[in-house]
Image (cartoon, grey):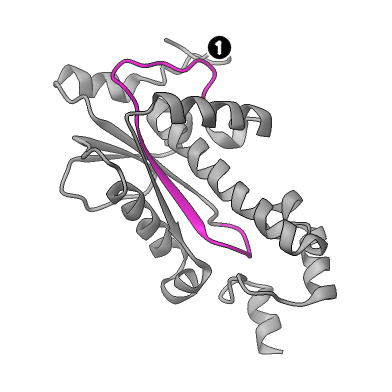
């Protein structure tokens, strides 16, 4: 049960829990901490016991085509999926670190099944069930990798919808991240609803 491109057993953390008769394991991850625009999105995914999905890994390491493939597959096989979305206003109010935690809590609360244990990518969370925070968990745990794909495809689809409304900003390409193309578009067309006003250079533009 190894991935093809390395020697990491992506079910290592899950199997340790299975041995203790813990079968309902939720993986949690987020996407969208760095963009200038839009929400931070988290996903929580509970996969069936012992399920292995060959080739699934951190969404950042997958092409968009592969992410979409795994998104469909995970939606089919998962026991439960929860999504959490925290908008730019809340991000500006509480900061991105706290907003990320809020998105993760929301995703876990939106699961239709209560997990017995939660595996989280890096972030410590206070829950009424046991948790394990794993640095680079989206590359080390299948459950977290599944959550990373769900979160990424969910947020990207939001950016495609924004792109239809404001094509001149190029959201379909940069997804709200601070690329040169994006900064140039902001300078040319100005700010629209959805920008994070606590982020530079948006913060400086708002002051001007």
Q: Residue at x 49, y 44 (%)?
A: 151
Extreme residue in the bottom direction: 208
Q: Quadrant of residue 206?
A: bottom right
Q: Which residue is mark 1?
A: 4
Label 1 packing within 10 angstroms: few (<14), some (14-19), many (20+)? few
Q: Quadrant of the N terminus?
A: top left
Image position of 28 (left or right of 33): left
Q: Quadrant of the C terminus?
A: bottom right
Q: Residue at x 29, y 23 (%)?
A: 14
- Judging depth in this view, the residue of 149 and 17 nearest the camera is 149
- Judging depth in this view, the residue of 84 and 124 nearest the camera is 84
Q: Quadrant of residue 78?
A: top left
Q: Secondary structure at mark 1?
A: loop
Residue 180 shown in magenta: no
> Percent position (x, y) of residue 188?
85, 74
Q: Which residues are magenta?
A: 34-57
Q: Residue at x 63, y 74 (%)?
A: 193
Residue 40 shown in magenta: yes
């Amino acid at each position: 049960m190894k991935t093809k491109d390395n020697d990491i057993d992506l079910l290592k953390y899950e199997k340790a829990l299975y041995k203790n008769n813990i079968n309902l394991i939720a993986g949690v991850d987020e996407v969208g901490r760095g963009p200038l625009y839009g929400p931070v999105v988290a996903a929580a995914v509970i996969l069936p016991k012992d399920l292995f999905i060959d080739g699934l890994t951190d969404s950042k390491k997958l092409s968009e085509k592969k992410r979409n493939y795994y998104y469909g597959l995970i939606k089919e096989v998962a026991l439960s999926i929860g999504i959490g979305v925290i908008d730019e206003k809340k991000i500006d109010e509480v900061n991105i670190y706290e907003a990320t935690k809020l998105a993760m809590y929301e995703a876990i609360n939106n699961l239709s099944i209560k997990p017995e244990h939660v595996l989280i990518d890096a972030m410590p969370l206070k829950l009424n069930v046991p948790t394990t925070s794993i640095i680079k968990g989206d590359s080390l745990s299948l459950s977290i990798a599944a959550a990373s794909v769900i979160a990424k495809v969910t947020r990207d689809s939001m950016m495609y919808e924004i792109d239809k409304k404001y094509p001149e900003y190029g959201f379909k390409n940069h997804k709200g991240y601070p690329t040169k193309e994006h900064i140039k578009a902001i300078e040319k067309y100005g700010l629209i609803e959805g920008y994070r006003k606590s982020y530079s250079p948006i913060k400086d533009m708002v002051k001007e």
